[in-house]
Amino acid sequence: MRFLVVEDEKRIADFLSRGLESAGYAIDVAGDGTRAIDMVHATNYDLVILDMMLPDIDGLQVLEKIRNRKSSPPVLILSARGGVDDRVKGLELGADDYLTKPFAFVELLARVRVLLRRGQPTPERLSVGDLVLDCIRRKVIRGAENIELAPKEFSILEYMMRNRGRPLSRTMIVEHVWDMDYDGLTNIVDVYIRHLRSKIDDKWPVKLIHTVRGIGYMLDLADKDSAAADR
């Protein structure tokens, strides 16, 4: 999942980015409202974390622009303005939640997960065969075995399961999971796919992660009629 953090204080933006990336999310950062609006129009974010006090335009104006889109992500407001009137105004203009600075990161993460559970049109639990991924509790089970995944491994697996049966290029995986562009030289996706296979495929006779020649990877039950996908 990819989030946009709109925060002009670099220290706070870095703190949020590191914490959310450690939790397995891909993060983009905008340091002002104008940039944030441009990024929201260019990218389908799963969540926006929005500071109210920005250097160019008020955060509430950014919120209105986000809500004017035909399809808009959940928005969590961060603000030093903690008065009742401020909170009510933010929520009335379309914010999904309001968190006052200073805040504990564990509380922010809990609120993020509640918003994702509330706003996701897709189910909280994804399954392919006997592989089950709990998106909210961030747990993976295959058969009766709990599988421990690193944050990036979890993000790749979730992305692949949400796109079951769809071939995903390395570019698509990198741009969705990492906050970077795929330069054609890195083998980072192949390395992580090998790690995932060792954890969710190698012990089981039915393989779920398939190599799609000339494209990338796909997660699905074996397709007997397909000659394009292979281990």
Image (cartoon, rainbow, N blue to C red):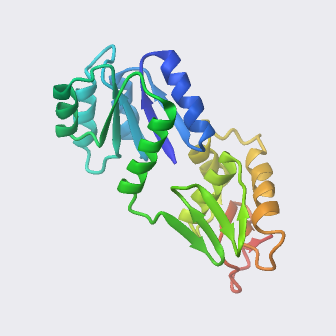
Q: Is residue 231 toward the left or the right of residue 175 in the image?
A: right
Up the image or down, 224 lies above or below 150; here it is: below
- Which residue does the image show at 59% across and 42% down from the upper left? 23
Task: Tell me where residue 136 appears, x and y as whole percent.
Answer: 51, 55
Q: Residue 44 or 84: which is nearer the viewer? A: 84
Q: Residue 227 or 144: which is nearer the viewer? A: 144
Residue that protrudes farthest toward the top in the picture: 55
Figure quadrant of the C terminus: bottom right
Q: Residue 18's quadrant in the figure?
A: top right
Q: Is residue 72 toward the left or the right of residue 15 in the image?
A: left
Up the image or down, 206 lies above or below 140; here it is: below
Q: Residue 197 or 118: which is nearer the viewer? A: 118
Task: Tell me where residue 142 appears, x and y as whole percent.
Answer: 70, 71
- Which residue does the image show at 39% across and 38% down from the upper left? 48
Task: Tell me where residue 228 appears, x and y as whole percent.
Answer: 72, 73
- Which residue does the image show at 38% across and 23% down from the upper left? 101
Q: Is residue 122 toward the left or the right of residue 148 in the image?
A: left
Residue 45 in sight from this viewpoint: no
